[in-house]
Image: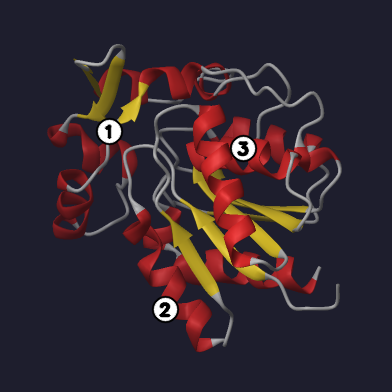
Amino acid sequence: MNERPMVLLAHGAFAESALWSEVLTRLRARSIEAVAAATPLRGLAMDAAYVRDVIAGLGRPVVLVGHSYGGAVITEAATHAHDVRGLVYVAAFAPDHGESAFELMGRSPGSMLAHALVASPVSTGGVELTIAHDAFHRVVAADVAADRAALLSVTQRPVAQAALMAALPAGVPAWKRLPSWFAFGDEDLVIPVAVHRAMARRAGARGIREVAGASHSLAVSAPDVVTAAIADALRG
């Protein structure tokens, strides 16, 4: 029980595990063991089950870190996982029972995501979403260099629309029983800053880092801030 937790990072929609590269480099420099999961992005229950499988495979306590939709994933995953020591929300959704990412995003004005989405039907059923390449830099990564933002755009992974519309199944979300830390930017054009502040406040966050001028791509534009939040969570 005294074993130092590993860090498990879960990316969100329109991203892949390399989103965490700068953070992983900094965690390694601090001798902090971490792994970035490749979340399927097919549905909230399915994605949470996958993260629980990764936790089980690690065989040791973990601190879960989620970005964007990944925040909903870690919230649900931790509900039925017994080796989670804390939650870190990085520009992420922290839903309560019955809340979805889409619903939370619209709680306050300021999100530009809905106008940037491109929907495509899937042959197996349903619709998946991507962000239009000509909107990606401004909406998702305005404080990231243009060439880096372009790379993020062309490597984005589509998300099933149903995943972003899914209500959190957990009757008691994990942030009500586990300590949490939040980091977000006040220029986030995906999740309005007022929503970030409200989620952190209701979760009784042990630490809140609000970065002036930062976009939704906090793990890329402010990796030192994200790393510091994770280090706080490891210290408890």
Per the image, the residue denoted by label 1 is 158
Corner quadrant of residue 79: top right
Q: Secondary structure at mark 3?
A: helix
CB under 8 Å between discs 3 and 1: no
How crowded pointer 3 is (Cα within 10 Å; few <14, some 14-19, many 20+) is rated as many
Q: Is residue 209 visible?
A: yes
**Which amino acid type corresponds to the residue marked 3 in the rendered image?**
His
Q: Earlier in the sequence, mark 2 or mark 1?
A: 2
Q: Secondary structure at mark 2?
A: helix
The residue shown at (44%, 51%) is 213
The residue shown at (49%, 83%) is 28
Q: Is residue 185 visible?
A: no
Per the image, the residue denoted by label 2 is 25
**Which amino acid type corresponds to the residue marked 1 in the rendered image?**
Pro
Q: Position of residue 110 (x, y in %)?
A: 46, 25
Q: Earlier in the sequence, mark 3 or mark 1?
A: 1
The residue shown at (28%, 15%) is 127
Per the image, the residue denoted by label 3 is 196
Q: Is residue 18 above or below residue 79?
A: below
Corner quadrant of residue 225: bottom right
Question: Which quadrant, please, contains the C terminus?
Answer: bottom right
Q: Position of residue 232 (x, y in %)?
A: 72, 69
Q: Is residue 64 above or below residue 27?
A: above
Q: Earlier in the sequence, mark 2 or mark 3?
A: 2
Q: Is residue 18 above or below residue 213?
A: below
